[in-house]
Image: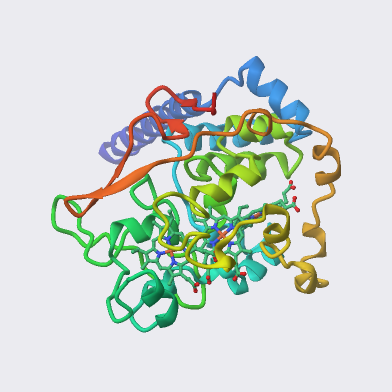
């Protein structure tokens, strides 16, 4: 008899346990379930992304998670590995893939002497130089030089891998984005490249190619000016040819990354092509890089872009 009670008790206990946790699980599920807004649906329709509701919810969840965070720099290495491999490989060997290295002692001695820079000095932590020789310096997610620490004293310097250059050179985001590519990257992935220029621009891509070069080339703060030497004159059409020498990097493994949608996009004209974005001005003050007010192309508080008047 006593045993029968014990067994009954156990059965009751397990029933409450199963029912109890069961409810918990559904409650959790309900909390996680999301409603896709009409705007999100329209965007995903345009990108021909994920027709199936469950898959679409997953995509929306991912996008929301990324967009909730402020836009920032992610580094060039993130563009390699399945999406823009030939562009990355070509960039690594291109002049912009080695800009950080020019700041090291002994590099380009003659050129440095010409503009009265000390050829034996290490400029790899000099704020002014880092602005134009690395990616996103002094901006969210951007390059942090050796010796950088957070408030708790923890080392936050950017890790440098010589085989996989990323934030420490003039990377993709310095020419293709306004304040970093974190949001844009999510848009490219979700749309599998089927975004239009306007969509991408809303998420921080820029298309004002001729203008963007003047963030550095011929910028008043650049030591190497056209009046120092002929070779620093800047002819956009000529220079553009040398930015992406991708031809020899196409192979059987990455052929599927050819951008068919480019042909469609060339016909579109985005806002930054009509009115280029403002170019940052800055100076070094008390060992820190200071941006001049009103010269930032993106206002992260108001989430607005600043175009040239
Ligand atoms: C406003 C942007 C800017 C700043 C600031 C800047 N640079 Fe540069 N730097 C450039 C650009 C653009 C070039 C490429 C010029 C060209 O080839 O036309 C360049 C080229 C160089 C070169 C190669 C020159 C050659 O002829 O081989 C060296 C070395 C260099 N920079 C060092 C420095 C150092 C050191 C600092 C800091 C004291 C610095 N730069 C600050 C934009 C900048
Ligand atoms: C120095 C500036 C600069 C850097 C750095 C740069 N790009 Fe570009 N990129 C350009 C310019 C300019 C064009 C347009 C070329 C043209 O119209 O012929 C372009 C075009 C492209 C295109 C074609 C886009 C389209 O829709 O037309 C892709 C993709 C691209 N770049 C990817 C990358 C990746 C990935 C990196 C980094 C590994 C990178 N770029 C680094 C300047 C740059
Ligand atoms: C964030 C700064 C920055 C931006 C933006 C930038 N560049 Fe540069 N660029 C540099 C630096 C630094 C060098 C020097 C590299 C070297 O001498 O090895 C350079 C070198 C070059 C060179 C090689 C010059 C040579 O003949 O050796 C070309 C070509 C060039 N840039 C084209 C462009 C074009 C086109 C754009 C705009 C689409 C652009 N760059 C935007 C910083 C920049």
Q: Quadrant of residue 232?
A: bottom right
The answer to whether one can see residue 164 in this image is yes
Nearer-the-camera pick, 168 or 234: 234
Residue 130 higher or lower than 197, as above or below: below
Q: Quadrant of residue 300?
A: top left
**Residue 251 place in picture, x, y as percent:** 81, 72
Q: Residue at x 44, y 76 (%)?
A: 111
Residue 289 higher or lower than 10, as above or below: below
Nearer-the-camera pick, 141 or 246: 246
State how many labels appear: 0
Q: Could you tell whether 9 is left or right of 55 in the image?
A: left
**Residue 210 place in picture, x, y as percent:** 64, 46
Q: Could you tell whether 241 is left or right of 139 in the image?
A: right
Colour pattern: rainbow
Q: Could you tell whether 265 is left or right of 206 in the image?
A: right
Image quadrant holding the N terminus, namely: top left
Q: Quadrant of residue 269?
A: top right
Image quadrant holding the C terminus, namely: top right
**Residue 75 place in picture, x, y as percent:** 49, 57
Q: Residue at x 27, y 67 (%)?
A: 146
Q: Residue at x 48, y 35 (%)?
A: 65
Q: Residue furthest left?
A: 152
Q: Could you tell whether 230 is left or right of 236 in the image?
A: left
Q: Quadrant of ligand 1?
A: bottom left
**Residue 240 place in picture, x, y as percent:** 69, 57
Q: Residue furthest front?
A: 227
């Amino acid at each position: 008899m006593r045993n029968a009670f014990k067994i009954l008790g156990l059965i009751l206990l397990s029933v409450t346990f199963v029912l109890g946790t069961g409810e918990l699980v559904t409650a959790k599920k309900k909390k996680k379930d999301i409603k896709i807004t009409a705007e999100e649906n329209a965007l995903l329709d345009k990108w021909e992304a994920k027709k199936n509701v469950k898959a679409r919810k997953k995509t929306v969840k991912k996008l929301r998670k990324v967009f909730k965070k402020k836009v920032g720099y992610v580094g060039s290495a993130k563009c390699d590995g399945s999406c823009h491999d030939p562009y990355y490989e070509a960039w690594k060997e291109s002049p912009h893939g080695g800009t950080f290295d020019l700041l090291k002692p002994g590099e380009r001695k003659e050129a440095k002497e010409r503009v009265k820079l000390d050829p034996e000095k290490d400029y790899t932590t000099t704020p002014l130089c880092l602005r134009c020789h690395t990616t996103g310096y002094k901006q969210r997610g951007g390059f942090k030089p050796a010796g950088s620490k957070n408030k708790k004293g923890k080392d936050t310097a950017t890790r440098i891998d010589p085989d996989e250059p990323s934030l420490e050179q003039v990377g993709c985001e310095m020419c293709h984005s306004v304040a970093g590519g974190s949001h844009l990257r999510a848009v490219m992935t979700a749309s599998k490249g089927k975004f239009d220029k306007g969509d991408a621009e809303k998420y921080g891509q820029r298309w004002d190619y001729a203008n963007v070069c003047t963030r550095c080339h011929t910028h008043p703060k650049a030591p190497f000016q056209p009046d120092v030497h002929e070779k620093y004159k800047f002819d956009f059409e000529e220079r553009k040819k040398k930015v992406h020498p991708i031809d020899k990097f196409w192979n059987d493994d990455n052929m599927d990354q050819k951008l068919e949608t480019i042909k469609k996009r060339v016909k579109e004209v985005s806002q930054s092509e009509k009115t280029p974005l403002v170019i940052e001005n800055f100076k070094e003050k008390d060992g820190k890089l200071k941006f001049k007010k009103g010269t930032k192309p993106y206002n992260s508080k108001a989430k607005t872009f600043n175009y040239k008047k």
